[in-house]
Image: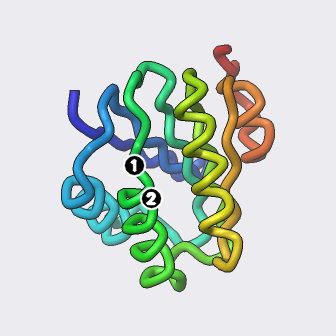
Amino acid sequence: MALEYSIDTGLRLVTLTGVQVPDFDEWRRAMLKILSHPDFRPGFNFLTDRRDAQQAPTTDYLRQVVEFLENHRAELAHCRWALVVSTPAGFGMGRMAMALCEGLTLRVQVFTNLRDARVWLGVRGLPTPV
């Protein structure tokens, strides 16, 4: 399954899912679609659900992502981005993403369950699957 996304305007949340790490160009194209989508507004939070993924992104991939985020800081300023992973390698790369994003105006946090990620994002009003 390729990278998929949904935008929930009521929750002010963009959710990204996929069982594989997309190549950076695929991720960039998806992000550009999200940022130009009529339902997207600056300040929306992001949730990347990678619980079904067995492969972790590479350091080079993360550096490209961070460069993209920095180049789009106006659209992404002050948002929160939760990464939900299920493997130790995914968690380690999530921690690296957190460190690489420290100088940006958005906050990144890695989680091992969806419930904690949704609480951190302030998502309320819907049942939270584990």
Q: Is residue 51 left or right of residue 55?
A: right
The residue where tag 2 is placed is 62
Depicted 20 relative to depicted 3: above or below:
above
- Residue placed at 49% from the left, 49% from the top? 14
Circles 2 and 1, Cβ within 8 Å, touching? The answer is yes
Would you identify the image quadrant in which residue 57 lies? Answer: top left
Quadrant containing the N terminus is top left
Q: Is residue 66 left or right of residue 100?
A: left
User: Secondary structure under badge 2?
Assistant: helix
- Residue placed at 43% from the left, 84% from the top? 71
Residue placed furthest toward the top:
130
Mark 2 Cα within 10 Å, few/some/many (few <14, many 20+)? Answer: some
Three-letter amino acid code of the residue under disc 1: Thr
Q: Give the number of the mark in front: 2 or 1.
A: 1
Q: Position of residue 11 (x, y in %)?
A: 62, 47
Would you identify the image quadrant in which residue 119 lies? Answer: top right
The residue where tag 1 is placed is 58
Q: Position of residue 48 (x, y in %)?
A: 50, 41
Measure the C-alpha gap from mark 2 to mark 1.
6 Å
Depicted 49 relative to depicted 107: above or below:
above
Quadrant containing the C terminus is top right
